Structure formats: structure tokens, C-alpha cells
Image (cartoon, grey):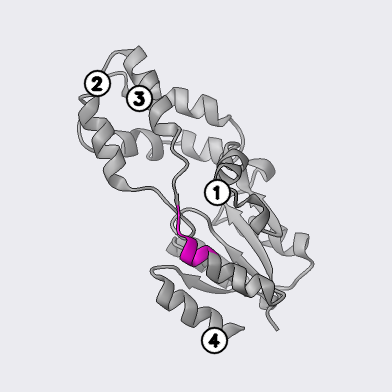
Amino acid sequence: MIKAIITDLDGVIRHFPTNRNEEYEKQYGLPQGTLVKSAFEHSDLNKVIKGEISDEEWRMIIAFRVQKFAPLEDCKQLIKEWSSFPGLINHNVLDLFLKYRKEGLILVLLTNATDKLDIDLQTHSIHDNFDLIINSSKIGKIKPNPDIFHFTLKKNGIQPSEAVFIDDSPKNIEAAQKIGIKSHLYSCITKLEKFLSENW
């Protein structure tokens, strides 16, 4: 019997409009794609979500990386403005999870995130919607490493067969499935509703 829903945050519950990046790049005279490439295509991304460096340090690294295209002070201001946005919450998805939580399922947030996560969740007033929050930067393990899934199951006192997992990354889904957690690759709420209803 399923006892817990384990869900990712970004790409499932929270989203960041891509046009924001393009708007900032135009405003500061950066080539298109610079922000994504500077922030997410380097090894320091793994360091910040493992908790090896702070969110603040990571964003300063991004500012220095972008400096090749604009003065450093402009880059610092750009990254400050870009970082201040906490994303958009898909309340339809969150409400669906909360419906099952009211029915008695444990709702767990399992996310590769920086030490800024709690602030973002509190900004959206959704921190208390979860029974447990597993932040990779606090435990030093990141998806798709199976250790983070075992850690999450142990914290909830459940077996793999007693949980379902939702994520938007095929690699994370594959990792969860390998240890016996029935998983769903999120693409839309209709398919998510079907998955949950079939496994409840």
C-alpha cells in the first residue's frame, strides 16, 4: 500500500519562465543563452546543490563568469535581480498533492536545491505543505544518486514499494525505479492525476 508521495520541486511544482532570462540578457547586452549556460552548465552547480558552496557564493561565481560580456558591477546587479525571483508555483499540481495528503499520504519534497530553498518556500507560503523536506545541499547527496532516495525512505520509515516518486528528469526517474520506487516522469497534470489515481 502506498504511504508517501515523494515529489521534485522545480519542473513539477515550481517553474521559471524562460523568457525572463532572455529579457535580462537583452537588458544587459548579453548573448542569448548566457544566463543558463553560465549558471547551469558548470561543475559549481553540483557544488552548490551538494552544499559545498553557498547559494551566495555560487551566484557570485556566475556574476564573474558573465563579466566577459559586461562590467562586473552590472553583472553583480544582473545576478542580484535575476536571483530575487522565487519562481512560479503551479497550484493545480500542489493542490492535487495536498488532496492526497488530506487522505493520509505523507507528502515529501525531495529536491536538488541550494541553501536558499527554505527562503523560497517561505516566500511562497508553501513550506508547511510538506511533511518532510529533503534538500540535497543539507545532506550532501543529490539525485540521481540512489543514496538520497534511500535516505528519504529511511527518514519516513517506509519501503520503496510504499512510495511513489514524481520528477521531471528521466535520470532521476530511472534511479528511483531501480531501487523499487514506482515513478512518474512529470509532463502535465492530466497524466499526473492518472498516475496517482492508479497507484492510490
Q: Which residue is mark 1?
A: 112
Camera-near label (1 vs 3) is: 3
Give the residue drawn at x 45%, y 33%: 84
Q: Which residue is mark 2?
A: 69
Q: Position of residue 114 (x, y in %)?
A: 56, 39
Identified by mark 4, the residue type is Glu
Instruction: Specify few, some or many for label 2: CA neighbours under 10 Å numbering under 14, 14-19, or 20 or more.
Output: some
Most common secondary structure along the magenta stretch: helix
Q: Which residue is mark 3?
A: 78
Q: Earlier in the sequence, mark 2 or mark 1?
A: 2
Give the residue drawn at x 71%, y 60%: 131
Magenta-drawn segment:
89-94
Identified by mark 1, the residue type is Asn
Identified by mark 2, the residue type is Phe
Q: State whether residue 94 is above or below residue 122.
A: below
Q: Which residue is mark 4?
A: 198
